[in-house]
Image: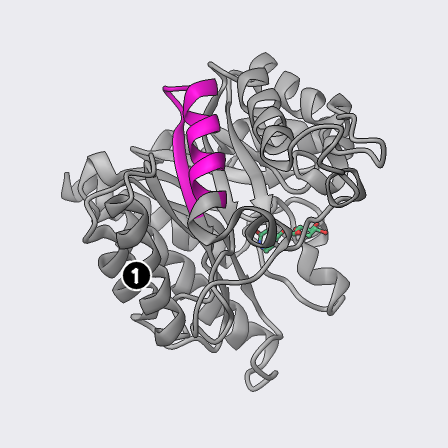
Amino acid sequence: MIAEPPLKSLAPFRIGTAVRAAELTEPAYGDLVARHFSQITAEWEMKMEYVVQPDGSFRFDRADAIAGFAQRRGLKLFGHTLLWYANEPEGFARLDETRQSFEGALRNYVTAMVSRYRGLATGWDVVNEPVMENGEGLRESLWTRKLGQTGHFKVAFEAAKAADPAAVLFVNDYHLESRPAKLAAYMRLIEQLLKDGVPLGGIGCQTHCWSEMAPGAITATLKALAGFGLPIHLSEMDVSTVQGGMLASRAEAEQRQARLYAEAVEAFAALPERQQFAFTVWGLRDRDSWLKRENASDRPLLFDDAGRPKPAFSAVVNALRRRGSAG
Ligand code: XIL
């Protein structure tokens, strides 16, 4: 069998995948990651839910293992994520003002994380998923309750900037392709952050999709977000083959999936070069996908359970080659 071409040899931009520390110890898995990708994102082991202990101490063992893999294999690291409404670890929530101000504890956490991977991390999702699902405003969280909407952005972004001035600092969100109100709210937030002088350096578009998604939605969303002139991170792409109803046969769902991956690559590659931060898929093989926990028959990624390339992989290769020949 002719070995499939390394994706990173065809992509004029960083191409990444989400990983977990345990999987990287599997030689076949690690080799496939290193063959195709130029950047890796910790799927969950650089989040507060893993790092912050109940006593407020930090645990970096798995984050360091992932960073070590990147260094050894000549890959870049993307930091995900500093603040997320879904992570309110006891170590913070229990913090009382006498021991250390809440703001001081948050600065300390952001500084510890970002400075630890300075020089290896190309950027960070500083605030993840701040917009309400229905787009009617911004989510409430421990961070907004303690520091206010603008306050928590300011504290987190400024601490991250001070810790690694070279890292590109992102806000990141999802379902922007399918929820116009959410996309509009996200764009209003970005405008506000830029107006407030928050050091926002890039815009994340997670791109969690499903095979029934209308062609063109990804393209329109990336174009809208690119209007700010900032680097764009297509940060977490997967294409569920079962969400949105099993309307099509498995073969048809996989063909639609392939077309959506190709559309995303074409839309991303059509951005001005300085705005092409990275194109990242949310996992390597179907069996590694978080979506499997919801539905074991889902096949959302570029490689099958055995690590063999799928039609989606070939679609990405062809889209990159078309872009490459277009010059
Ligand atoms: C998910 C991981 O894939 C899971 O393994 C973990 O249990 C929960 O988080 N958007 C995000 C990611 O920004 O951090 C989420 O990752 C998926 C949705």
Q: Position of residue 92 (x, y in %)?
A: 73, 40
Residue lying furthest right: 55
The quadrant holding residue 113 is top right
| Residue 210 pos. (x, y %) | 51, 70
Q: Is residue 65 above or below residue 43?
A: above
Q: Is residue 170 magenta?
A: yes
Residue at 46% over, 56% down: 173
- Residue lying at the far front of the rendered structure: 98
Q: Is residue 326 left or right of residue 254?
A: left
> Chief secondary structure of the magenta span?
helix
**Which residue does the image show at 49% across and 30% down from the upper left?**
39
Question: Looking at the image, is 200 positioned above or below residue 210?
Answer: above
Give coordinates of residue 43: x percent, y percent.
Answer: 64, 42
Type of the residue with mark 1: Arg
Q: What scheme was used to colour the molecule?
A: one colour
The region drawn magenta spans: 152-171
Looking at the picture, tell me which residue is in the foreground, 3 or 85.
Answer: 85
Q: Is residue 100 left or right of residue 274?
A: right
- Is any part of residue 5 visible from this angle? no
Q: Residues within 10 Å of mark 1 (few under 14, many from 20)?
A: few
Q: Residue at x 75, y 34 (%)?
A: 52
Q: Which quadrant is the N terminus positioned in?
A: top right
Residue pointed to by mark 1: 188
Q: Secondary structure at mark 1?
A: helix
Horizontal relation, residue 36 to residue 315: left or right: right
